[in-house]
């Protein structure tokens, strides 16, 4: 007796249909995930507005003549349109503003007032910078009594003063000692970095010298002031920064009650409190 052959199934097996449906659902799921991850906010608002419109729950508001529909995209910064005139309106500037970064219609036209405290701050910073520069000198401890720095109405006053047993210049001479030259050279970079002009003045005590005919305290103090100027100039201070170099002999003693004190012999440098002058090539 012949055996019956098993029936041959035609087409795909039944389980493949279920598998294909599962894959289709997964593909749709991933497409939706990708779509949501790169959604366009503006398009989403359009869709949301359309849905609200379809279901009859659209809200309508009028503001400043513009119709704003909730869910319908609009420029976010156009919420209220009004022209407010201002005394310093930046959109209508037609004057040059030398202190502003921009010019013409885009210029910053707000008024600027300089604070009065700014100049004293600069002087305080300059004094601290000079003291810091002197700290690097090994002889600064020995010279501490020879250095006076104070702020006056004329500006920042720096004085190199003779003390008993330690002078700043050789006796009756305009030749400075090594420590005097070091002090002047160390302060030069600080003075160079500031716009203020300098006045250098030489002073003496009441002791009269007559080593040379026609050469007295006036000539000696002027020569010492000019020596200080040359040292500062050789250390980098531009020549146009010097306003005056003066010798005043003993006419302005540091200690009026005892004009013979050694401390009356000094060279003073004033960082002037003034607006820097215009350059020679400046054009108005």
Image (tube, rainbow, N blue to C red):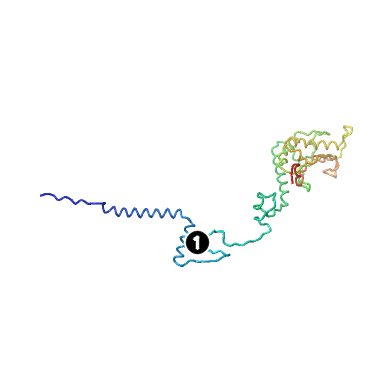
Q: Nearer the viewer, residue 185 or 206?
A: 185
- Residue at 40% across, 53% down: 31
Residue 158 x/y as whole percent:
76, 42
**In the rendered picture of this protein, how many numbered marks are placed on residues?**
1
- Residue at 53% across, 60% down: 74
- Determine whether 263 is above or below 21 in the image: above
Question: Residue placed farthest to the right in the image?
Answer: 213
Q: Nearer the viewer, residue 139 or 266?
A: 266
Judged left or right of residue 222, residue 18 is left
Question: Residue placed farthest to the left in the image?
Answer: 1
Residue 9 x/y as whole percent:
22, 51
Residue receiving disc 1? 72
- Residue at 57% across, 65% down: 65
Question: Residue placed farthest to the top in the image?
Answer: 212
Residue 220 x/y as whole percent:
84, 36
Question: Residue placed farthest to the bottom in the image?
Answer: 56
Q: Secondary structure at mark 1?
A: loop
Judged left or right of residue 222, residue 193 is left
Residue 89 x/y as whole percent:
66, 57
Which class describes the residues within 10 Å of circle 1: few (<14), some (14-19), or many (20+)? some
- Residue at 57% across, 60% down: 78
- Determine whether 178 is above or below 102 in the image: above
């Amino acid at each position: 007796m012949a055996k019956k052959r098993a029936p041959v199934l035609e087409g795909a097996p039944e389980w493949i249909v279920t598998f294909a449906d599962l894959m289709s659902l997964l593909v749709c799921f991933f497409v939706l995930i990708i779509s949501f991850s790169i959604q366009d906010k503006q398009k989403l608002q359009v869709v949301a507005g359309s849905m609200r419109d379809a279901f009859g729950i659209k809200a309508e508001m009028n503001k400043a003549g513009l119709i704003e529909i909730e869910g319908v995209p609009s420029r976010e910064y156009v919420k209220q349109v009004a022209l407010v005139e201002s005394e310093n309106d930046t959109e209508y500037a037609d004057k040059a503003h030398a202190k502003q970064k921009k010019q013409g219609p885009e210029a910053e036209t707000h008024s600027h007032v300089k604070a009065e405290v700014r100049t004293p701050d600069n002087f305080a910073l300059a004094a601290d910078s000079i003291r810091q520069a002197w700290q690097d000198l090994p002889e600064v401890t020995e010279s501490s009594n020879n250095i006076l720095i104070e702020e006056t109405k004329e500006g920042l006053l720096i004085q190199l003063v003779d003390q008993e047993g330690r002078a700043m210049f050789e006796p009756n001479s305009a030749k400075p000692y090594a420590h005097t030259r070091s002090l002047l050279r160390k302060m030069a970079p600080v003075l160079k970095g500031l716009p203020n002009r300098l006045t250098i003045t030489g002073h003496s005590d009441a002791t009269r010298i007559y080593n040379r005919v026609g050469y007295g305290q006036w000539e000696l103090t002027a020569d010492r002031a000019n020596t200080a100027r040359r040292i500062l100039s050789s250390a980098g201070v531009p020549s146009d920064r010097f306003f005056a170099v003066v010798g005043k002999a003993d006419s302005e003693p540091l200690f009026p009650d005892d004009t013979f004190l050694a401390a009356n012999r000094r060279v003073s440098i004033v960082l002037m409190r003034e607006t820097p002058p215009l350059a020679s090539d400046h054009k108005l």
